Image: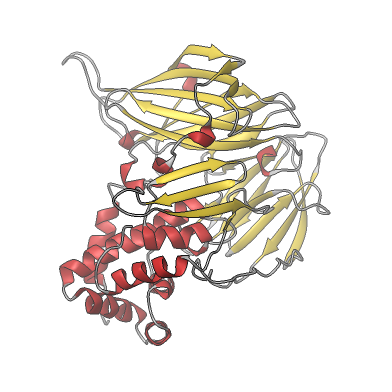
Amino acid sequence: MKRNPIDKLIDPLQLGRIPRRTNFNLKRRLKYVNLLQLIWILLIGYGCTSTQQISNSNLADLYRETEKTIKPKYQVYHLDDDLTQISFILQSTNLLYTKNSEERPFTAKVKVTYMLFESYSSNLIVDSASFVINDENNSMVRKEISGRFNMKAKYPNKYVLKMVVLDLNKGASESQFITIDKTTRNGRQNFEIKQIDEDVIEMERKFGDDKELKVFYNDPMVKKIAVKYYNRDFPLTPPPFAVYSPKRFDFTPDSMYYILLDKENSFVLPLNKKGMYHIQTDSASKEGLTLIRNEDDFPKVSNASQMVEPLRFITTNREYNAIKESEFPRDGVEEYWLTVANSPDRARELIRTFYNRVEDANQYFSTHLQGWRTDRGIIYVIFGPPDVIYKNAQGESWIYGNGKTQPSITYNFNATYNPFSTNDMRLERNPEYKTYWYKAVDTWRQGRIYKY
């Protein structure tokens, strides 16, 4: 069998990702930790104020994957009109275990803090609390530390939840901002998802392999659920200077069926073919929960097709078509990178950085589209993470450059209503971006990694 030469470059790429994003197969025997055995409530506040509005803070760390080590995951589930439940998972391999003496066990100490704000532009804290997790792990086995807590969030309001996880042993912290939407009883946060084989919370909504999930709905009066299935292809997002009017989405599903809920007010949903599964309590509305079966191994880049398509940003039409139509596309990808780099070592570094950015864009910006195909995704892949990010309910502003030694450039992204995702943002396109775009593309084509 012919061995694709790209394997010689891809192997280091995959090895290079291991420290950055480790995914465990949850079908293995993992040790789950009961939160009730781990935490002490340290602080509970209500009606407090914070010193600074979120919208005035530089949130550039949100999309700097290389600087993240804890990587918590969360799920939001509205229990009723007054309470919302937050579930979380931490991987033991992302925490630092230490011990004070030879007689004491290795222990991780993690402080979790949440603050529920009225909005990005308000410093009023509606609800807040902190707790510390102490996890003993003397044998250093891989396990998941999972737990949940309830907070006060009233219908029909929308809030912003700030989650901060601090590894007390290594002094590293990570923050995330989550929209808590209680403006509708038909929305995605009224559903809870579990893995059917482990009966644990499923944090993902987009999958790179076949799944069978158990879906719960919070209103016991609802006994029937509609599932709409969509399998659509979408055109590639053009460069940021191009005039672009996206085609309106046709909400007529490719197929649709109804499911009766069981005594737990749940049902089992198999995701066994690629596409979007839109789950609704009212099929006449657009609101609901969307689960997406993406390409295999998503959000990773693991096959020739996934490597070829993002090259469209930095190749000519002739180059791109030659690679895509090649008998062995992986060979074409390797030949392209070797040609622009002029050395295998430099080609490896280009490949590693370029496709790491593609994977990170998939992780951060995916909607009904894969993340690298979105407006934020194409900017992230070509320019890298921005130096400054300002975020509010209307969208995000990305700033590259410091405005002193180099002129700064700003990309503004507007939040867009999308019934399939809360993560959809559209770039305010501008012909002035053309010079910056081609400078970045030319840098990649000259065999150098571009960072503004």
Q: Let me know if residue 252 appears in the view.
A: yes
Q: Is residue 268 above or below residue 40?
A: below
Q: Is residue 44 above or below residue 88?
A: above
In the picture provided, is 62 more to the left or to the right than 155? left
Q: In the rendering, at what x and y percent does residue 446 appear?
A: 25, 74
Please state the total of marks drawn on the protein image.
0
Q: In the rendering, at what x and y percent does residue 132 appear?
A: 41, 18
Q: Residue at x 52, y 71 (%)?
A: 238
Q: Nearer the viewer, residue 228 or 445?
A: 445
In the picture provided, is 206 more to the left or to the right than 108? right
- Among the 4 quarters of the image, the one containing residue 181: top right
Q: Nearer the viewer, residue 262 or 438?
A: 438
Q: Nearer the viewer, residue 33 or 408?
A: 408
Q: In the rendering, at what x and y percent does residue 180 appear?
A: 63, 35
Colouring used for the render: secondary structure
Q: Residue at x 54, y 13 (%)?
A: 44
Q: Quadrant of the C terminus?
A: bottom left
Q: Is residue 4 above or below residue 56?
A: below
Q: Quadrant of the N terminus?
A: bottom left
In the picture provided, is 229 more to the left or to the right than 222? left
Q: Residue at x 59, y 47 (%)?
A: 213
Q: In the rendering, at what x and y percent does residue 355 appear?
A: 35, 62
Q: Residue at x 43, y 84 (%)?
A: 317
Q: Nearer the viewer, residue 4 or 309?
A: 309
Q: Let me know if residue 4 appears in the view.
A: no
